[in-house]
């Protein structure tokens, strides 16, 4: 039975086993998908294949600056317990090194990269880690900055990973500035970095919301539409202050009273230089991953009912 590249890809998705091993399995079984899965199990990849379907929503969001290259990466595991092991954290830190030094284009390219101090690929190392740690693990995403000055911040043991990119002038050390901005991002999760970046569609939507609120307010409903629109426009400052990093009130009021943009300018001036916020990346561990919620009481009840039959 012949097989195609799509079959290899499908087997890989089913088992979480490397492309070459999947190809060998299909060759050995004449393209029979079920037999190929059994072949992989027989070759010692059963544990990785068995666990590949489990939801990996824990793990860490990690950030670091490696030889001047800023990296932020999220690697997921099934449980928080596994994510706190030295073996898991060593894996994450080494993956960050791969991203910094080998600059893979995407997650698939990262998996094909050589793992540090090894002849194995990232995929092969992760298969070994799955078997030794006993949980499914997935590289979810990563980003990097290779220009300007990057500052990394990891919050609460990996619940948030933040990478801030700054343009620094005057030869000053902007590490503390970058860290404070990163902490602001982790604490406040701004939707945009600056009000100039807010899409017009989002501005129009917010204006429409403000007008609708007045339409439903007995004290404001009778006012002319032009008046409502003018009032709504005046309220956009509050929207920007809530949604945009540089316009947000700086949370470290002990250091500076004002917005984040003002803090950056003031802190840089005190150091004798100039700092401009360029960009940032904020990963929240497990964000958007649908987690399985187990009903323990129902599970126990079902087991008791089954035993009683």
Image: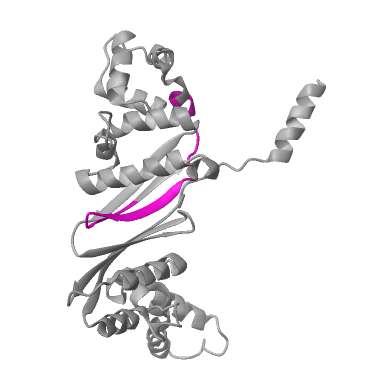
Relative to 294, 32 lies left or right: left
Whether residue 52 is visible, yes or no, is no
Answer yes or no: is residue 12 visible: yes
Q: Where is residue 135 in the image (x, y as percent from the top left)?
A: 49, 33
Q: As displayed, is residue 17 above or below residue 206?
A: above
* Residue 209 magenta: no
Q: In which quarter of the image is the N terminus?
A: top left
Which residues fall within the magenta stretch? Answer: 48-72
* Image vertical order of residue 114 relative to residue 154, above or below: above
127 relative to 263, above or below: above
Residue at the spot x=28%, y=18% of the render?
A: 23
Residue 154, x across and y down, in percent: 41, 58
- The picture quadrant where one finds residue 112 is top left
Given residues 201 and 20, the one toward you in this image is 20
- How are the colours assigned in the image? one colour
Q: Nearer the viewer, residue 174 or 57?
A: 174
Residue visible at 78% across and 28% down in the picture: 304
């Amino acid at each position: 039975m012949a097989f195609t590249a799509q079959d290899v890809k499908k087997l890989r998705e089913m088992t979480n086993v490397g492309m070459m091993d999947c190809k060998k399995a299909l060759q050995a079984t004449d393209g029979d998908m079920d037999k190929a899965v059994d072949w992989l199990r027989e070759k010692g990849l059963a544990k990785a294949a068995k666990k590949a379907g489990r939801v990996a929503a824990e793990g860490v969001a990690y950030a670091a600056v490696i030889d001047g290259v800023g990296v932020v990466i999220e690697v997921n595991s099934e449980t928080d317990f596994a994510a706190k092991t030295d073996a898991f954290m060593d894996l994450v830190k080494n993956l960050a090194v791969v991203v910094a030094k080998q600059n893979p284009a995407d997650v698939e390219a990262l998996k094909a990269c050589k793992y540090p101090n090894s002849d194995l690929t990232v995929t092969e190392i992760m298969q070994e880690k799955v078997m030794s740690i006993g949980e499914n693990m997935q590289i979810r995403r990563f980003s990097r900055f290779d220009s300007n000055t990057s500052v990394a911040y990891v919050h609460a043991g990996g619940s948030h990973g933040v990478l801030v990119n700054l343009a620094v002038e005057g030869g000053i050390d902007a590490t503390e500035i970058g860290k404070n901005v990163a902490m602001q991002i982790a604490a406040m999760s701004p939707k945009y970095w600056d009000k100039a970046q807010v899409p017009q569609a989002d501005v129009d939507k917010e204006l429409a919301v403000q007008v609708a609120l007045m339409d439903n307010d007995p004290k404001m409903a009778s006012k002319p539409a032009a008046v409502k629109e003018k009032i709504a426009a005046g309220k956009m400052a509050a929207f920007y202050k809530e949604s945009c990093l540089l316009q947000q009130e700086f949370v470290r009021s002990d250091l500076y009273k004002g917005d984040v943009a003002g803090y950056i300018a003031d802190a840089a001036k005190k150091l004798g230089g100039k700092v401009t916020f360029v960009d940032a990346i904020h990963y929240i561990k497990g964000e958007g991953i649908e987690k399985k919620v187990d009903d323990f009481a129902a599970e126990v009840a079902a087991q008791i009912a089954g035993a009683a039959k």
